[in-house]
Image (spheres, helix red, strand yellow):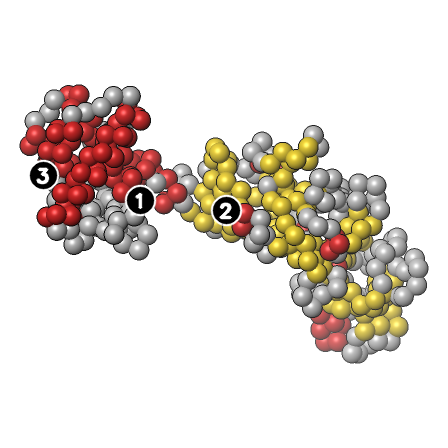
Amino acid sequence: MMNHNTTDMSNVTAKQSKLLVDRLTHTIQDKIQEMFSTTLPEEFIASRLSRMRLDRYTSYPFNRLASYLAMLLYKEYRSRQSTDAVYKAMEKELDPSSIEVKRKQLVNVNIKDLLGLRTAKELHAAINPLAGCLHSYLVLDSKNRLVVEDGEFKQIVWNYSGDIRLQDGLVNTQIPIKNIVCAKLHQSILPKSMLDSNGTAIDVSALSRVSLLIYEFRAQSYIANASRNYHFITAPIAAINSTKFVELQVENFIKGEYWFRLPIVEFSTITMTIGNPLSILTMPDDRFKCAAVGYSPTTIVFTAPTDTGLTGSQRIYVSGFTTLTPTHPTDKATIELVNSPLGIQTTAVLVAGATNFNYTIATALNDPDFGIKPNVFLGTNRAIFTMEILHLPD
């Protein structure tokens, strides 16, 4: 049995063929009426359809087939082409031999000019523009953000490049992203503790909803109120095996997708803002330059310039740590470990106003440097957004 959207014509009998011609005739007539506010003689439509080998169009979407034939027949009727010419044109221009649709095939067309569409690629894009969509993927990590404001911050900003380059503040894809039609949010995380609009610390996992806005695309977004737009609405839940992060669930909220009415042509930065959901939330300070580095025989003490508000064991990411004898075997091994991109696990002093992060090392350093001030990123205050971008070819 044929459904409304697709028609399986792989085994069309004579009786079925007549039924199909009748159905196509009425559908084409409706579409001509809809598109051109007129009608064609049903005998004219039926005579053309009866000469077509309908069994060749296996699994072609019925409504699209009817729309396409409606345009061809209207054009032919208006120009009074001969029956043979139309039949040959249809057979040539509607060849279902190559482009895949769903699990079988779409039409591969060869058209000189149809309503201004001069190539098969143009027609394919007009009939089913999403079929040629490219998929690119972004990992937006606040650890690698572009630092545009010191301390707490309301916007997480990255520069964007459509090539593979490793650089601070830069997010990449393998090919340039242009003509964006859809942005999809996948599993993402936020720090559990953030600040509300009054600067008060809040537990993000206790919120019912969290909204996210890509600031550069705000012209096409949901408008919640005068001060807040958003692209995604999510449900925060406590992260598995972690008391310091929340995960943003998107499955129940239009699958985390935002489809743009007009393609986003291009962009050079990506800016993410977070809401609760209607007021902007502020990210806690996530990095500092050490005020001092102290040592005991098997402990390195990283001292923050101000209270970070963190207690207990923390994962921190250090860069710029060294000693006065960096090539010494013991020092070299410790330097590589402390500066590892995977971070190190420390303990913060469990008192109010604590600023010291202590890291235990296996062997005492040969010649520690008390004058260095390495950079420290606080892993607890990290946000990571994973996104899929659907975009049209250039």
Occupied quadrant, residue 349: bottom right
Where does residue 308 sit, x and y in percent of width and height? 84, 55
Of residues 209 and 88, the one nearer the viewer is 209
User: Dot 1, crowdedness within 10 Å: few (<14), some or many (≥20)?
Assistant: few
Where does residue 189 sit, x and y in percent of width and height? 66, 56
Q: How many labels, in total?
A: 3
Of residues 329 and 5, the one nearer the viewer is 5
Q: Which residue is mark 3?
A: 51
SS of the residue at dot 3?
loop
Occupied quadrant, residue 117: top left
Residue lying at 93% horizontally and 59% vertically, measured from the top left: 352
Of mark 1 and mark 2, the one earlier in the sequence is 1
At label 2, the amino acid type is Ile
Task: Determine the CA span between mark 1 and mark 2.
Answer: 31 Å
Q: Is residue 285 visible?
A: no
Residue lying at 71% horizontally and 73% vertically, measured from the top left: 333
* Mark identifier at residue 389: 2
Mark 1 or 2, closer to the camera: 1
Q: Which residue is mark 1?
A: 4
Of residues 148 and 332, the one nearer the viewer is 148
Residue lying at 28% horizontally and 51% vertically, measured from the top left: 100
At label 1, the amino acid type is His
At label 3, the amino acid type is Arg
